[in-house]
Amino acid sequence: MNATAFTQQVKAMSDRLVNLYQGIDTSSSLPPSALSELGIASERLEVAAKMLYQQNQKLSLADQTVEAERQRYQELLEFIPDACLLTDAAGTIQEANQAAAKLLNRQQSFLIGRSLNAFVTHETRQHFQTKLHRLQQRPGKQEWQVCLQPHQGVAFHVSVLVEVNCQQANQPLTLRWLLRDASDAFGSSRSDHGNQVEAQEQPDSNTDLGYPLQVYHKGETIPLNPQTIWQVRSGLVKLTTFSHTGQQVLVGLAGAKAPFGSSLTALPLYEATALADTQLWCIPLTDFATSPKLKQQLLPQISQRLRQTELLLAVYGQARVTDRFHSLLQLLKQEIGQPVADGTRLLVRLTHEDFATACCTTRVTITRLLKKLQQQKKLSVDSQRHLILKGWDKN
């Protein structure tokens, strides 16, 4: 029984109880207390029905949210040009994108519930099983070479990137797989000779493909055209949005090879600013949509940008400004740090305002925190005003 039907039944019972009150003769032997108890019980049922209805509405909204997230995840999965799989620890396929179906020459629906091991050539199947077992003992990303036998197709080698998806306690392990035809990764080919020549003649960099290279100096705003994608050749770009109060919020730092553009974000307000003299390639969005080579080059960098954004969200999620600032320095150390004799030097000179924007605080607070770290000998400034982190961690 759903909440609406239950509510209707409770209301009908309440109406019958009212009619019963009105029809009872005052000379009736029925104790008044019994009628009072019935009334109280009816009121409690009405309250319970109302709460149940409200809870049902919340659950319905939550279901819609989950479905929207699932759909967005599925669209992103299908957008990736490489074969992507999710399996259990034994290699049984739980999810697969269209590229995986094409690679294995099977419908997506057919792949679900099938063992990936069934697509490995008989000669290498035992070796594959051994590596799969060892992966569970040593979690982390691993790169393999595997010989696959697609359905009714010719066997070929694939480059595999596989990672254990760590679950909560008592939850079964799952594995994430990225499969790429080794002819794409290593220059060999399983197509005809004419295709081999064409692949060898293709240039390896965006510069050779003829895309224009543009230069923006420190502090300049980079125009964002929805029909193009920028890719950084050198320098650093600050990507920001604005809150409803007008406060600038850092959403990303695009360094060498990183792509960005208004077509890669859902934010209505999005701004790109050069933090140093920066060289950029301007790539037409139509080329990216139609070129497997460009997708192969850019999608790993887009994925890296997404991971960076998640780290920035974790920074913003910390309540104390000190913790946000320390976490930001750790992130910058990873993203733009260069090892030097006395620590790690940040390659780009950031202003106190840049730090304040990233930490959602004021320049005065950032100045105080920087001085404190200098007093603790955890940070210094070189002759070019670049920060040097000295064995620093947030503890």
Image: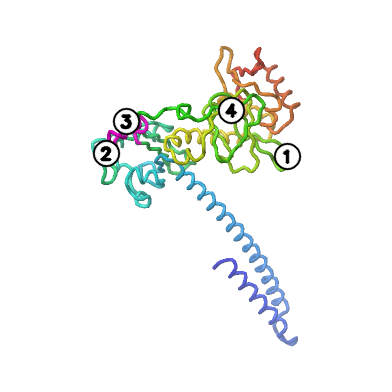
Query: Which residue does the numbered mark 3 point to in the structure image?
Result: 197
The disc, 4 or 1, on the residue closer to the chain's N-terminal end is: 1
Query: In the image, which is nearer the foreground, mark 4 or mark 2?
Result: 2
Q: Decide whether residue 195 is among the magenta residues.
A: yes
**What's the residue type where badge 4 is placed?**
Leu
Q: CA distance from mark 2 to mark 1?
A: 58 Å
The disc, 2 or 3, on the residue closer to the chain's N-terminal end is: 2
Query: Which residue does the numbered mark 1 point to in the structure image?
Result: 246
Q: CA distance from mark 4 to mark 1?
A: 25 Å
Residue 210 locus on image (x, y percent): 48, 29
Point out the stretch of residues depicted in magenta: 181-199
Q: SS class of the residue under badge 1? A: loop
The disc, 4 or 3, on the residue closer to the chain's N-terminal end is: 3
Query: Which residue does the numbered mark 2 point to in the structure image?
Result: 155
- Disc 2 crowd, CA 10 A, few/some/many (<14, 14-19, 20+): some
Query: In the image, which is nearer the foreground, mark 4 or mark 3?
Result: 3
Answer whether labels 2 and 1 touch (C-beta < 8 Å): no
Q: Is residue 356 above or below residue 83?
A: above
Query: In the image, which is nearer the foreground, mark 3 or mark 1?
Result: 3
Query: Which residue does the numbered mark 4 point to in the structure image?
Result: 331
In what quadrant of the picture does the N terminus appear?
A: bottom right
Q: How many marks?
A: 4
Query: In the image, which is nearer the foreground, mark 2 or mark 3?
Result: 3
